[in-house]
Structures are given as structure tokens and as C-alpha cells.
Amino acid sequence: MKDKPTHSEKDINLKDAIFVFSSFTFICLAVVFALIVYDVLTIQSFLSFEKPIAMAICIVAASIGLLLFGVILTRYIPSRYIDDTNKDYQNGPLLGVFFLMFTGALFEEILFRGIIQNLIYVFIENQWIAIIATTVLFLGFHIQYFKKTIMLVNIMVPSLTFGWIYFETNNIFVPFLVHFLMNFGITLLFKYNFIRVKR
């Protein structure tokens, strides 16, 4: 019988995950830089600050909406449909969980919205096809959830939202902040027992 991981092993796993996400984030930023230098993307389509009010509204409304969506799913979906990886990391130290959520959201948004969604849009020139295609790839990236199909809904709705608010604001920080606030918020609610999975 496998021993339960100790607190220090969880710390190491958190540190390893943070390191991996950080490393891939730097690689993605290098790719974005190259795409801008070679005029495939523009800085205005990646990091525009032309719509500050729309950015603020998107961050607040999408964060609250997706947080509520996660709480509702958690309240009504039995625990057997929720993937075990989501139950493990919330027990780590708060600072470690913060950096895991931060680096994970930053990496995923730069890769999926900043690179993939932008490139699909450059070639297809249809925002919703780019958003949906990116969401399909985003689901494929979370292959661990394929055995728990309801988890795919839990990923699909936020991904469509991230893609839409990115095109609305042309600023990668907007979907990143929403992604981070949603993940970190749900994790805190679980960590401090404000919500629990349905038995």
C-alpha cells in the first residue's frame, strides 16, 4: 500500500510545478517576442491598454462569474466526478499555492490565448473559430480530466470566457488575471472549507 505523501513531499511537488510553469512561461514569452519582431503579431494585439474600463469590467465580471460557476459545480456535482489532482495541491502552504496558481495561469494564457489563439486568428480571421479551436486544444492539454467528463465542462466554459475577453481587450493580462483569480479563489474556498465537494 502506497504511503500518503508527507507535507515536505507536497512542498517539493509544488516547487517543481512552479519551476516547470515558470520555465515554460519564459519560453512562451520568447516565442511571443519573436512573433512581434517578425510582424506576425502586433504589440497592440497582445498588450493593448486602449480600453481600461472594458478591461476592469471584464476582470471583475468574469472573475466573479467564473468563481460562482465553480462553486455551483462543486455544490451539485458528486466528488466521484471531480479529478483527484484538484484535491491535492490545496493542502500545500498558501504561498506555494499562490505561486502555483500564478505561474500556471500565466503560462496557460500566454500559450493558449497569446500564441495559439492569435496565430489561429491570423490565419483564419474569425474570432469565434479561433476561440473555439483554442478551447479544444486547451481541453486536450488537460488530458487528465478525460476520465471525468464533467471536468471538461469546468474547463471549457472558462476557456471560452478567457478567449472572448482577450479579443475584447487585446491585453493578455486580462484573461491571465481572471484565470488566476478564479483558480486561486476556488482553491482558497476549498482550503479553508468554505466549500466542499458533494459526497
Image: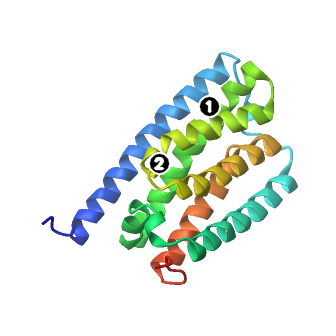
Q: Quadrant of the N terminus?
A: bottom left
Rendered residue at 76%/64% (across/down)? 60
Rendered residue at 60%/29% (across/down)? 32
- Residue 93 is labelled as none
Quadrant assignment, res 49 = top right
Identify the colour scheme used. rainbow
Q: Which residue is mark 1?
A: 115
Q: Amino acid at mark 1?
A: Ile
Q: CA distance from mark 1 to mark 2?
A: 24 Å
Q: Are marks 1 and 2 in contact (CB under 8 Å)?
A: no
Q: Residue 98, image x and y in percent?
A: 48, 64
- Residue 146 is labelled as 2
Helix, strand or loop at disc 1?
Answer: helix
Helix, strand or loop at disc 2?
Answer: loop
Q: Residue 114, image x and y in percent?
A: 64, 36
Q: Is residue 80 left or right of residue 15?
A: right
Rendered residue at 37%/73% (across/down)? 91
